[in-house]
Image (cartoon, rainbow, N blue to C red):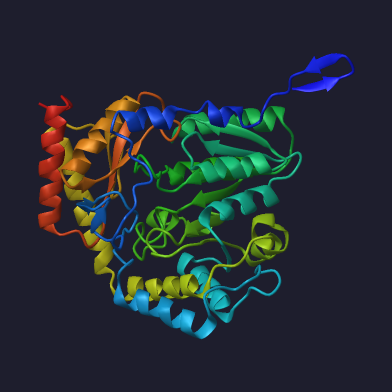
Amino acid sequence: MHTKGNTEVTYHDIFAKCFNFDDADNVKAMGIYPYFHPLQSAPGDEVVVDGHKCIMVGSNNYLGLVNHPKVKEAAAEASRKFGSGCTGSRFLNGTLDLHLELEERLAKFTGKEAAQVFSTGFQTNLGVISTLVMKNDAVIIDRQVHACIVDGCRLSYGKLYKFAHNDMDDLERVITNVRNNNSRGGLMIAVDGVFSMEGDIIDLPRLVEIAKKFGARILVDDAHGIGVMGDTGAGTAEHFGLIDEVDMTMGTFSKSFASLGGFVAADAKVIDYIKHTARSLIFSASIPPANAAAVLAALDVMEAEPERRERLWKNGRRMKKEFEDLGFDTGHSATPIVPIVVGGDLDAFAFWKELFDNGVFTNPVISPAVPPGQAMIRTSYTATHTDEQLDRVVEVVAKVGRAKGLIS
């Protein structure tokens, strides 16, 4: 409260929303709070969470490289040689020869002229979209894209439009209206290659046709596609044979590469512009030596051991079939991300808790990550899951599903 003259004026406290926030406390009181549970072990296929041993089917360690000896040793050796961090941005004092080597490897890996590494995948999309989409431009996104694409659009000066999830007819309708009513400014279509919650794949061939027709550039966020999709793991564009038709491929290091960071690959002139203008790059410290070295080692393993990707797909296909044969709704998943659609948010939390108590760690996903009423248990698989581990997961999921009335 503040006195102005003889009048008392009451101001809103910016912390009021914090003091009134009790959603998490309510779920905790019900004993089904699923978030921020600490691991007391390495994040492999079997983990210890809150002192409780679980089979992990909730990570993005798709190729099982997070504990690979070559990856761990590369990270350790880089720390011994370069220290624990770079203490500065890439723009100034934070560029190592490791970073440059990594960018050359990533460009070659994705079939592009050049690549730029960012400190995180989230910052990659923030920087790329906000620096390319300017006033009078427009960006069109799938309604189910990752939050970092949405936030990158919010930071840009362009107009944002959305189309129905993976619906190319709706994309064509939206882009037609944009071209007819907006301007002749630049257009970007930004989508996930593999959608991180649903596990489905963007209809890239049709999207490319539409983009060409309307003169739009394409950004594919392949955070969950790099290392997984394509003959060499180069991502969704490689999977469809459309590497040359996709203008920018974005990826992260925290999934298949078992590290931390992000990158974008594109034409050399586009990368040069991004590296000199993207604020999330220029004003962030560069990734530590260990992170860069781990990704380089992961690339080596991916190239030397293609059978890892084959085992990953074998495990993913098996689990999707097992769940569908039991009667679960797995949506439109077409990758080693296999969701089980539950419905209500609290139902998903209760399902998660029963699985956890029975030694299976999964991820409950609720709105806004998925549409309201479509809450799900997200499961994801690795190249290193054993048949015995997957047998146990099927057994537990079936048991809990029957108890919850989701299957008979």
Q: In this rendering, does residue 325 appear at all? A: no
Q: Residue furthest bottom?
A: 81
Q: In the figure, 113 relative to 317: above or below?
A: below
Q: Position of residue 91 (x, y in %)?
A: 69, 69
In which quadrant is the C terminus drawn? top left
Q: Position of residue 277 (x, y in %)?
A: 72, 58
- Left/right of residue 184 with respect to residue 240 in the rendered view: right
Q: In the figure, 277 relative to 194: above or below?
A: below
- Left/right of residue 93 with respect to residue 390 in the rendered view: right
Count numbered badges in the picture. 0
Quadrant hosting residue 269 = bottom right
Q: Position of residue 330 (x, y in %)?
A: 25, 36
Q: In the figure, 338 relative to 287: above or below?
A: above
Q: Position of residue 360 (x, y in %)?
A: 20, 46
> Which of the two residues, 215 or 6, is positioned nearer the viewer here?
6
Q: Residue at position x 68%, y 75% from top?
A: 93
Q: Residue at position x 45%, y 32% from top?
A: 167
In which quadrant is the N terminus drawn? top right
> Which of the two residues, 344 or 167, is positioned nearer the viewer here?
344
Q: Residue at position x 52%, y 33% from top?
A: 171
Quadrant hosting residue 223 = bottom left
Q: Residue furthest top?
A: 7
Q: In this rendering, does residue 167 appear at all? A: yes
Quadrant hosting residue 232 = bottom left
